[in-house]
Amino acid sequence: MSDGLGHETAPGHIQPGLSRRDLLKLGAAAGLCAAGYPASVWSAATDTKDQIIISRPEEFQKMDAYDNFNLVNYSLFLHVFDFLVEMDQNGKIVPSLAESWEASRDGLSWTFKLKRGVKFHTGDAFTSKSVKFSLERLKDKKLARSGWWSELDRVDTPDDYTAVVRTTAPVGPMLSNLMTPTVMYSEKQAERDGPTFFDKPIGTGPFKFVEWRKNDRFVMDVNPDYWKPGVPKLKRVVYRPIMEDFTRVAGLRSGELDVADTIPPDQVATLQRDEKLAVLRTMAWDQLYLGLKCDQPPFDKVEGRQAANYAIDRKILVEKIMEGGRPAAAIVPQGVLGYHDGLKPYPFDPDKAKSLLATIGFKTGTRLRMIAPEGWYPKIKEITETIVSQLKGVGIDCNLTIMEGAAFTQARAAGNYNIYVTGGASWDADQLAYQRIRNDVFKSGYRNDKVFSLLHEGRTTVDQNKRAELYRAAQEILYQEGPMVWLYQMEHIYGLKKNVKGFIGYPFKVFDLRKTEKA
């Protein structure tokens, strides 16, 4: 599809007593029902032109857009809300609710001129007071995304259609942060609803929220009064979180799904042979990696961290298991500001890894805890089992636990691991490097004052070329110190019906149905 850029939790519950092989034998539609999805789950309207059913292996988690890092939340909120700015298909930041903006010379204020005539789904007007209410919420340090806004001071509202964002230091990723998703809330609705405000998201977007059934569906209907002409094309969008790859693929092949996200690479050829289906695959701004607990042996020593890097054969992961992607070397993926093309992936050298472990007296047989999220990434079981085997080959024994996404998120945030396996999708180096290294949101225990200083300078520098230099310098140190084992940059694969037109999958793993229609 010419208009797709292409491109991470929720379980598809399998009925006890039925094996994967049993389900496959039942056939696509029967398999779906046997897997615990009754016929009513798959709306009969999928053969009409006014509805899309889309699925990926990720559950919508929270109604508050500012209190999670979940990419399916971003995707769905993109349809219910608008942001001040957004990114187009070429990776360029473009106007949305803000028609224009200007940074002050000292970088301490950003003035946004706002779109007039925009209304929330309740009929309330979107004004600068909405911007003030929304952004100043991010000063609450209990919110997950507040770390991206630590320099925020206040928002001034000189008139209804001018908002001035003032900060305590320059913010280099200001525009990137406004897409995180930094949705715009209705201050009037918040006052009316009080503590129930987040029970039902109300935005200015092209779709209105209808319902959320946890682990089952998220439904949106068209906003007929949307301010952008000709958008949306659809009347309804239904999002279905389905963890099982084979169930998701079966739903697409049987026609019950219009779009299936995160297609396993070994299913691509099958889908391509189906004349009713198309495959969209693109290199994502997302890399799978191992996060190491750097305040516990053996990763409290740089030799132990380097040993883990030398122990992994990335070529096997990319070529034999994933059948796509590229080996990774550093925290910023190719395509994102700050990418360092001079750093090459650690070579596979198990003898070097063993030697490094010997120098720090690491005892073979010490068992470490490795955790990974179920279903977030294709082939995660095969990938993690291969990694466990490769680490064992150099003397690092791991107990692997693949857990439901919410449990994984909690364990990772609490630092309850020796190694965690996850991805890192971003559109600005600050979002990964600052949060996961300097702010240490996943409790790795890694510290390096020089790295921290470079990352802070990158965050507080408005000159984007200078920022790129700073992030490259930080990555050179991180490469040697090895607090993370970068595995590979992921290819993201969608399967979709050929009559689905105008679908966009952004490289940062967010899907966009605002201009999608069915021919």
Image (cartoon, rainbow, N blue to C red):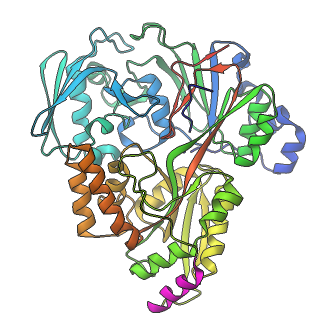
Query: In terms of depth relative to the viewer, which is nearer, 164 or 403?
Result: 164
How many numbered marks appear?
Answer: 0
**Residue in the image at 26% along x and 38% along y:** 174
Quarter location, residue 177? top left
**Residue in the image at 74% along x and 41% along y:** 268
Give the percent coordinates (x, y) of residue 326: 57, 55
Q: Is residue 389 above or below residue 194?
A: below
Is residue 183 rendered to the left or right of residue 133?
A: right
Give the percent coordinates (x, y) of residue 133: 23, 28
Quarter location, residue 183? top left
Residue farthest to the right?
Answer: 25
Give the percent coordinates (x, y) of residue 156: 12, 27
Q: Which residues are magenta?
A: 349-361
Q: Is residue 57 above or below residue 479?
A: above
Q: Quadrant of the N terminus?
A: top right
Q: Quadrant of the C terminus?
A: top right
Q: Is residue 187 above or below residue 484?
A: above
In the rendered structure, does residue 129 fall within the stretch colored magenta? no
Is residue 406 rendered to the left or right of residue 473?
A: right
